[in-house]
């Protein structure tokens, strides 16, 4: 007989916002807070050498996860800083008088806000629309490239819908026109296979806290050859990270980031299959109550993410009434503090009513079948009650 596991409430289904740290990551980090506290830039004694060695090992682990070389990894405070360094750093190093960036309207705010900042500095930005299912029109992308286009910025996978973009095809278009490709792969790395060489990516940003590592740690991959990417540092002072990002290295965070990457590399395939099964079970059982639709294409998406519209419900009431049982969100964490409807779903052409009743559910390493069963039971009950009240 299968043992029935207790459900810890509220069930956490917001792993795209952040993931809990894996205990194995914390265990790896702990010695570097008190016992092995050296500065990795201290080259004259064993404390520094020990810290430097730990950073080197972690850099190898991070590079291995995305198929990069160790000298192509720049440690940052997170993906947002990595995106800023990539976009601003490349444009500052580029000598063209007129500069042009292409991105899409469903990008993360880290890219969109950086682009809007650069527009104030006379950089021209094209914000491509997306299709109803959240995908990119590659012909429109190709037509948008001009002689002044420096960079294409398109995320690997969308943080709200889980839609995975055809990065290899996009990279081929960029390479054909001698344009750099930056991809924010924060939601993809560690969840699905990402290989910068095979994918043809020039710059890639990602964060540790989206893959069961520590908050405050991220990395930027910067291609070293074919082509060699040149960028100007945005933080000066000491020449750390090969003069690309100065500042004393966060050794415990880097060690944790490395361990998190190592675990993802080892467990990704099995974990992805398990999470896709949980997500599909969740969708199937909810769909059975009727009036449920999935936002975004289901043909190419992350295995652990779903964005669901509940017809005939009151969105605010649903998330309030379910809050003690399930932790989930309307959109990305960076936008949830505002009362504005999801700009991602808006860009996909969904009505305000549908957006108001749409929610993101993202499963993770510690999600269980019992979590799914409990969540479906709670949501089904609330939705049915809302529809009953509406019909009275």
Image (cartoon, rainbow, N blue to C red):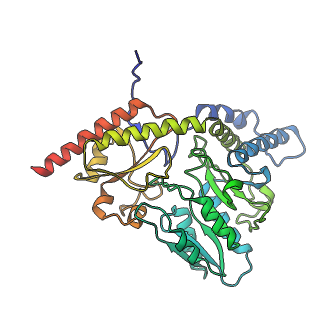
* The furthest residue to the bottom: 97
What is the quadrant of residue 331 in the picture? bottom left
* The furthest residue to the left: 392
Residue 362 percent coordinates (x, y): 45, 45
Q: Nearer the viewer, residue 168 or 206?
A: 168
In percent of the image, x 52 and y 42: which residue is there?
19
Q: Is residue 8 visible?
A: no
Name the side, left or right, on which 73 lies relative to 206: right
Q: Is residue 379 above or below residue 35?
A: below
Of the 4 image quadrants, the one containing the N terminus is top left
Name the side, left or right, on which 256 lies relative to 356: right
Q: Is residue 391 visible?
A: yes
Q: Is residue 3 above or below residue 25?
A: above
Residue 16 percent coordinates (x, y): 49, 48
Q: Nearer the viewer, residue 28 or 155?
A: 155
Name the side, left or right, on which 322 lies relative to 174: left
Residue 180 percent coordinates (x, y): 68, 68
Number of numbered tags placed on the structure image: 0
In percent of the image, x 42 and y 48: which residue is there?
306
Residue 323 percent coordinates (x, y): 33, 42
Q: Nearer the viewer, residue 44 or 287?
A: 287
* The furthest residue to the right: 44
In percent of the image, x 62 and y 46: which residue is there?
193
Q: Is residue 313 above or below residue 369?
A: below
């Amino acid at each position: 007989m299968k043992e029935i596991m207790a459900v810890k409430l509220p069930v956490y289904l917001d792993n795209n916002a952040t993931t809990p740290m894996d205990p194995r990551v914390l265990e790896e980090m702990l010695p570097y807070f008190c016992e092995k506290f050296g500065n990795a830039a201290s080259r004259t004694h064993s404390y520094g050498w020990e810290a430097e060695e730990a950073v080197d090992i972690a850099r190898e682990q991070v590079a291995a996860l995305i198929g990069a070389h160790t000298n192509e990894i720049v440690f940052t405070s997170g993906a947002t800083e990595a995106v800023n360094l990539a976009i601003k750093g490349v444009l500052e190093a580029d000598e063209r008088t007129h500069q042009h960036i292409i991105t899409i309207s469903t990008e993360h705010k880290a890219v969109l806000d950086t682009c809007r900042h650069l527009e104030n500095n006379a950089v021209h930005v094209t914000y491509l629309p997306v299709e109803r299912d959240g995908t990119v029109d590659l012909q429109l992308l190709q037509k948008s490239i001009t002689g002044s286009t420096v960079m294409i910025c398109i995320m690997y996978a969308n943080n709200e819908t889980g839609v995975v973009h055809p990065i290899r095809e996009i990279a081929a278009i960029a390479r054909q026109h001698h344009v750099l490709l930056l991809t924010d792969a924060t939601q993809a790395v560690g969840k699905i296979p990402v290989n910068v060489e095979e994918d043809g990516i020039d710059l890639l940003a990602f964060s540790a806290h989206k893959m069961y590592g520590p908050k405050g740690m991220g990395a930027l991959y910067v291609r070293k050859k074919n082509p060699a990417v040149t960028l100007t540092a945005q933080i000066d002072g000491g020449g750390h990270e090969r003069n690309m990002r100065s500042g004393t290295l966060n050794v415990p965070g880097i060690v944790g980031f490395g361990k998190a990457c190592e675990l993802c590399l080892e467990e990704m395939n099995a974990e992805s299959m398990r999470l896709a099964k949980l997500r599909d079970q969740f969708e199937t059982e909810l769909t059975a109550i009727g009036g449920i639709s999935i936002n975004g294409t289901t043909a190419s998406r992350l295995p652990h993410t779903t964005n669901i519209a509940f017809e005939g419900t009151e969105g605010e009431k649903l998330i309030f009434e379910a809050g003690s049982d399930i932790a989930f969100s309307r959109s990305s964490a960076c936008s949830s503090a505002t009362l504005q409807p999801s700009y991602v779903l808006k860009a996909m052409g969904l009505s305000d009513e549908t957006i108001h009743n749409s929610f993101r559910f993202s499963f993770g390493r510690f999600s269980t079948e019992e979590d799914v069963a409990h969540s479906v039971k709670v949501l089904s009950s609330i939705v049915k009650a809302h529809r009953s009240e509406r019909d009275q």
